[in-house]
Image (cartoon, coloured by chain):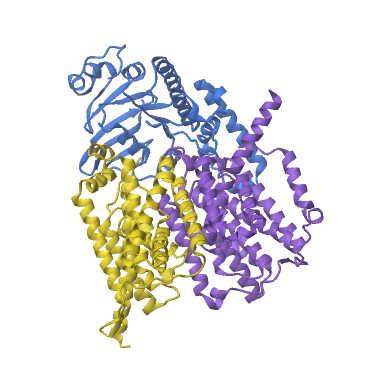
Amino acid sequence: MKTLGRIWWIILLLFIVLYPPTLGGMSAYKSGIMIFVGIYIILAVSLDLLMGFAGQISVGHAAFFAIGAYVSGILTVKYGASPLVALIAGMALSGAVAWAVGRPLLALKEYYLAMATLALNEIIVTLIIGLQWLTGGASGLRDVPSFSVPGFSFDNHVHYYYLVWAMVLLVVASSLALVRSPFGRTLVAIHSDETAAKTFGIDCAAYKVRVYVFSAMYASLAGSLFAHYMGFLAPDDFGVLTSINILVMLYLGGIGTIWGPALGAVFLKLLPEFTYQFQDYELLLNGVILIVVLVFMPGGLFGILKSVAERVNARGSG
Amino acid sequence: MSEDILKVVDVTKSFEGVHALVDVRFGVTRGHVKALIGPNGAGKTTLLNVINGLLDPDRGHVYFRGHDVIGMAANEISLLGLSRTFQLIRLFTVNNATVLDNVMVGAHKMLKPTISSALFFRASTARQEKAVREKAMEALAFVGLEEERDTPPGTLSFGNQRLVELARSLMAEPELLLLDEPASGLNDAEVERFIELLAAIRQKGITILLVEHNMKLVMNISDEIVVLDFGKRLAEGDPAAICTDPAVIEAYLGAECGLEGGEG
Amino acid sequence: MSELSTLVQFFFSGLTSGSVYALIAVSLVIVYKVSLLICFAQGEFFVIGALTMVTLTSKGLPMPLAFVLSVLISTVIGALVERILIRPIRNSSVGNLIVMTIAISLALRGSALLVWGKESHILQPFSAGKPLHVLGATLQPQVLWIIGITVVVLFVIWFFFERTTLGVAMRACAENRLGASLMGISTQKAALLSWAWGSGIGALAGMAVAPLLFMQYSSGLMPMVKGFIAMSIGGLASIAGAVVAGYLLGIVEAYTIGLISSQFADTIVFTLLIIVLIFKPSGLFGATRSREV
């Protein structure tokens, strides 16, 4: 995988740091949008590791988003735990669930796997709705406090924006490091051809579970960040439709590139801002976008950007 | 005294009533090249799959370096020193994998990469990677494809793809190399090249079990031949004996094969 | 209500939902057998069929005409979807095909949202009439319609696939592509027809049950998933299995909701699916397949 030049990282960093003071990001609304974008970038990137690299389809990734959000919400609201502890607990629980169901689930192929991941998502959501005494059920969980670490509370939305984006950069950087490493190469082998991979000593099941756990923990992180931002959780935000939303971001941006899904998340989360009157069209638009990408631009937005960049480069050096 | 690195003992396998393998029994001497020949449907690939661990037989044993590998997972058997290529090319092509990436996967068992090594022990991982990359370049040089290292394997010619597969399987430093019809689809020049490469591999001390239809290749490189027909071992012996064996001629060869023979 | 009548009530409820699940499962099986695809968008035909009929009857069309037209419209949409969106990517990876059917379901659902809005719609029962009383339990006449339609559909399916040349050829397509083309049907035509069947049956299921439910644009996901659960339990490529499993699922679900817990009925059903997928992925009626290399 080609590396994005240093210059782009710097530009990205500058944009993130300068957004609040310069581009009006000081307002609760504007920083809020970017917090949402950041959370969904984490979700999309975590799913890309599983789907784009390890090749395991998941139509239920929101299950771990839910676990992170509700563990953070419940532990801080009902048990007064510190948000940091709750966040870590959420990641631990998500990882544990992924580890427990991972091996049998990921042994399934394609359609079966898709349905099993969907079922897992539904199980988590129905449990959330059913365990009303714990989760607030369908009416939701309220009064989730702001995120805080010992000594500092992130009440200010701008502060929280920086926290979230620090997390985003961590997630993106670590995911890139992972996919460029020998571990990443192993995932590509498994994705391409498990049978051949086995003949090189690759324990496919073990590697699939590992990336599943890793990806689940990142989704959980996104969930916790979501909980502390929203202050209120409703089970509707964590169902299969959300999982499918993440899937659309993945494909729109360009599956299997890490940067692509991040781009897809930005696009799909910012688009409603400009098409507010057409809110009802959002669902149809999502479907059409996905269809167009699948048929005409399988490399997604990132693929298009890359080919444009290559053409510019070729012309420059030619 | 050379011992058998591989011993196939009474391996039997049926698929829904079809007897794919029936009491197959033979050995492969360490350091030799043994060819497994026979008509299509004789069970040759099935046998490789059993040896490799991709398929469990109904009965029988396979001893590799003294271990009974029946029931072991394919990746575990590979760790014992077994590598294999496939009849249909199985190169890794997703996520823009290059030829070099493919060959580097061959070194998996040496690296056994983990998530923590990728994220935390960056320096030592980088050093390992460098060593693996150099070794992979050597393997590519061995098959003559160093220049194609950044190419996506799907765009290579058939013959070159087979060479990449060979390079990849050598990376694992196998003691026994299983080759499943490596010459199928190759032209004469490519077959010649392949013969040279196999001879060089043999010189390194690697044992080879080779499934092949191309009798020129078989005759030029094999120390022994075993013939399979309808899942049963029909004959076993040195090339001269096999070539003149009437049963083998009738079942498969069609005529006595000289050293210039073409396809069987 | 007495003990017995309660149990009977659950049974009727189970028969109702069981019929829906059986029909959807069968529609999924037909598409799968012929084109080796599992259509994620099946639930949308369920909704489109029902809501189309609601619209047509509200515009004054007599019910039988609205019925036939709704089935036809859904069938045509299904065929168009296959022709325009599925056929071009026929040879893509399975992952891509799965995502494509997901995309189609989004697009169809989004269209339904635009056409019918977020409100719930209710359809008139097919025949006016007071509820019947059986063993102390209430039986809506519409339930008889549902079961009747299911039986007729199953008979038509049986007749088509067993007794007509076209149907037999389509079945052959599933097993042997070359043989099928010798029998006079291209795999492309068979795939198209299978989608037409699938969307038609899905629509019928929706239309039959619409008078008993509040139907809205998003009502399709659950029936589709439950249909898939039935399909998985019954054996992916078995129509008979799908029917039996569909009714089994409906009845077990009804009793679970009634006797054990209505809150966790779905949790139990989905856990059941995962268990079936893990331990007997070929379903109760499917053959176990040997490992392929």
Q: In which quarter of the image is the C terminus of chain A?
A: top right
Q: Where residue A206 sits: x, y (%)? A: 48, 49
In front here: B191 or C132? C132
Q: Where residue A260 sits: x, y (%)? A: 61, 45
> Residue A77 is drawn in which quadrant?
bottom right
In front here: B50 or C84? C84
**Above or below B150: residue C138:** below
Give the total number of marks visible in the rendering. Answer: 0
In front here: C176 or C198? C198
Q: In percent of the image, x 30 and y 48: which residue is there?
A: C289
Q: Where residue A97 sits: x, y (%)? A: 51, 61
**Most extreme residue toward the front, as rendered?**
C60
Q: In percent of the image, x 24 and y 63: which residue is there?
A: C152
Give the colour in which the image draws chain B: blue
Asked whether the viewer can see residue C159, the reply is yes
**Above or below A110: residue B88:** above
- Left or right: B104 as drawn, with respect to B79: right
Give the colour in which the image draws chain C: yellow
Give the colour in which the image draws chain A: purple
Q: In percent of the image, x 25 and y 84: which residue is there?
A: C135
